[in-house]
Amino acid sequence: MCIRDSSETAPSSNDLALAALKARGQQAAGACFVVGEQTQGRGRLGRQWTSRPGDGLYLSAVLCPQVPRDVWPSLSFAVSLAVYNMLADAIGDTEAQISLKWPNDVLVNGGKIAGILLEAGDAGVVAGCGINLKNAPTDTSQKHPATSLDRFCPNGQMYSAEELAFRLVHKLAECYEMWNVKGHQAVIADWQRHCSMIGQNVHIQTPARLIEGRCEAIGEDGQLVVCDTAGQQHFITAGDVEIMKGQA
């Protein structure tokens, strides 16, 4: 993987990567795109991702897996694990608690610091990463308010977006290789070790209904396994999750 293009501004880094995938097909595999500001940044479930100039790292990678398309969604675990690993190195040995939240968010001390957006094309997948570096958005309506890297860097040492981008590309290559060589189950098992939700009470708004219960595990194919108050087990593949603090 390598950074193919770095732009001051663009609608989104995913748009640049999707355009490359459409134009070059599998020949675009491994290309990464970084922008300093996204004018139309987006997240999961159609949400807007605030992307002010200089406040974040916005990077998208083109991946062209040689496996059936129904396995591609599990790449979100590989990508969020890569972001986790990069941020864990950057934050270092501090009291900050960094964790993963299903399906692909990265939290520090309970605040969302990064999110992942996968978008598929005919020949492959674009994996977009948005990481708050400073001036985290202050949207109090969010269940997990945003936080930013500058609050946790040891001794006030803040890395540049360019340096973090290169570190992230390295971690992405490592996790993508694990996904390809060992399989998505190995990635998900590693991902689960850093998940903050296991054993916690959660609310999940699925496309069909609200489910409340205790998170038991992440299934081998990435499902969220929840046992509700009636003792019924649910295997959830899509939904919006809230961790209920103080109710473990």
Image (cartoon, rainbow, N blue to C red):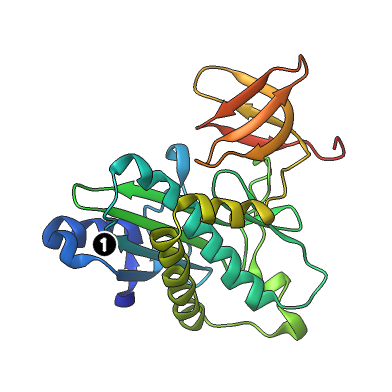
The image shows residue 125 at horizontal and vertical percentages of 30, 53
From the image, which quarter does the C terminus lie in? top right
Image quarter hosting the N terminus: bottom left
Are there few (<14), some (14-19), or many (20+) residues within 10 Å of tag 1? many
Q: Is residue 53 visible?
A: no
* Residue lying furthest top: 230
Left or right side of 18 for 237: right
Q: Quadrant of residue 209?
A: top right
**Where residue 103 sits: x, y (%)?**
55, 44
Relative to 42, 92 lies left or right: right
| Residue drawn at (53%, 57%) of the image | 80
**Residue at the spot x=73%, y=83% of the render?**
156
Observer-nearest of 19 and 76:
76
Which image quadrant is residue 65 in? bottom left
Whether residue 9 is visible, yes or no, is yes
In the visual, does 22 lie left or right of 247?
left
The spot of residue 184 in percent (x, y) is 46, 51
Q: Residue at x 64, y 51 (%)?
A: 192
